[in-house]
Image (cartoon, rainbow, N blue to C red):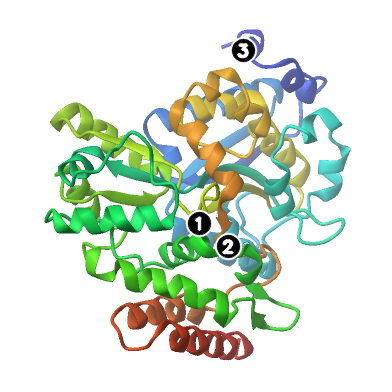
Amino acid sequence: MGAVRLLAGCSFFALSLIAGTAKAQTPVTLQYWVYSDFAQGEALKLQQEFIAEFEAAHPGVKISISGKGDDDLTTGQVTGAASGNLPDVFMNGLAAGAQLVEAGALDNIYFRWMAMPQSYRDQFDTSAIASCMPKPDTMYCLPYTGFGEIMFRNLTVLKEAGIDTTNPPKDWAEWLDQMKKVKAAGKFAMPDQTQVFNSVASTYAIVGPDSDWGIDFATKKTLVKPESYAKALQLLVDMAPLTSGTSRNDQATKDLFITNQLAFHVVGPWVDPTYGQAAKDSGLKYDFVLVPAAKEGDHGGVKSYEILSVAPGKNADISWQFASYIAEKKQMLRWAKLLSRYNGNAAAMADPEVTSLPLVAKSVEAVKYALEVQPPYFVGAYPNCYKSIVTDNAAAVADGDMTPDEGAKDLVEQLNDCIASN
């Protein structure tokens, strides 16, 4: 396929990015690692479109795409940095950023970023860009896809419990009341929020504040304060008798929701295709709303981004060109339409072709309120003991082994010991 035909659908800005690069270059093959979900089916076809467009404008450049599981991405990038065999362009999650910095896997793209036109830089969500910039003159990523948690509601379960589903619960008190009605009707209200770190974080986000979450790597102490965290533990105690006993990530949780046994599922938008298919196949009636918070008008849930990064080395310049091309509005607009998923290109998220997609529109709104999962990013890696301490503590309090106040005090002490010993 000729370059003219391939580039016909590209934006003026995308063309300006690659103008003048159609001259022959020293042959190079860039290794491009993506999430396994992005390397199959329709997602792979679209990635291949991006690759073909870029290759057409860069004779001599070939891009080899490989899909990797979450753990394989991080392991491969860390070991690749040690062996000098890194992929040139790759995806990962924000939470893995500090580990990759420590391994030497990430090129500092700040000056390449600043050399881009202001119109390009203005396309991105400012908070997402800030997450990629841990200190002045330092930038380790471009925001790519992402999520803000939303609450999926099984409308059949709620109506059988006598709940008016016209409007979502306005705050935690109303939401808890609805959970109790669901339990009284013989159904489960929620998954067990103590089993997964992100669901504990999501529960904390209901009461906040955001400033009391994460790690202060300068002092090597947790930012969690007992008085604020005790409120979150009380929420877990209140929910404990109402839950399914399954975690938010279990297939059993989705099965319960699909078979009208579970009322609420607070999670990322990636479960919507499953629930959407169930709506077609078995008549599942559901919707999705923002996660309620303690105060009316506020909302809970967590957020994070998948990121694009570039390896240091001889291919860093052309790798940056490719990464910046696929993160540009035209490409991210196509990506959002295909996946019906939020991403970090704010210009794409504001485009009418995307704002008309209910799931994306709700995700964009959710991100405005949501809590960062493991802040700050690219500063220090969370010790392995950190997450397990949080979930074990949450489970112990929910089981009645400690009061919320006792649990909060114990948690802070354990987290500080964990951080200090790593």
User: Is residue 55 in sight in this rendering?
Assistant: no
- Which element type, helix, strand or loop, lies under badge 1? helix
Q: Residue at x 74, y 35 (%)?
A: 321
Q: Residue at x 46, y 44 (%)?
A: 290
Q: Earlier along the polypeptide chain: callout 2 or callout 3? A: 3
* Residue 32 quadrant: top right
Query: From what the image shows, is residue 34 above or below residue 404?
Result: above
Q: Are marks 3 and 1 in contact (CB under 8 Å)?
A: no
Q: In the rendered structure, which amino acid carries the disc numbered 1?
A: Leu
Foreground: disc 1 or disc 2:
2
Q: In the rendered structure, which amino acid carries the disc numbered 2?
A: Ala
Q: Provide residue 9's location: percent of width, then percent of height.
A: 62, 12
Q: Provide residue 326's location: percent of width, then percent of height.
A: 63, 32
Q: Residue at x 50, y 56 (%)?
A: 73
Q: Which residue is mark 3?
A: 9
Q: Provide residue 185's location: percent of width, then percent of height.
A: 13, 53
Q: Which residue is mark 2?
A: 96
Q: Which residue is mark 1?
A: 73
Q: Earlier along the polypeptide chain: callout 3 or callout 1? A: 3
- Which element type, helix, strand or loop, lies under badge 2? helix
Q: Provide residue 422's location: percent of width, then percent of height.
A: 60, 86
Q: Are marks 1 and 2 in contact (CB under 8 Å)?
A: yes
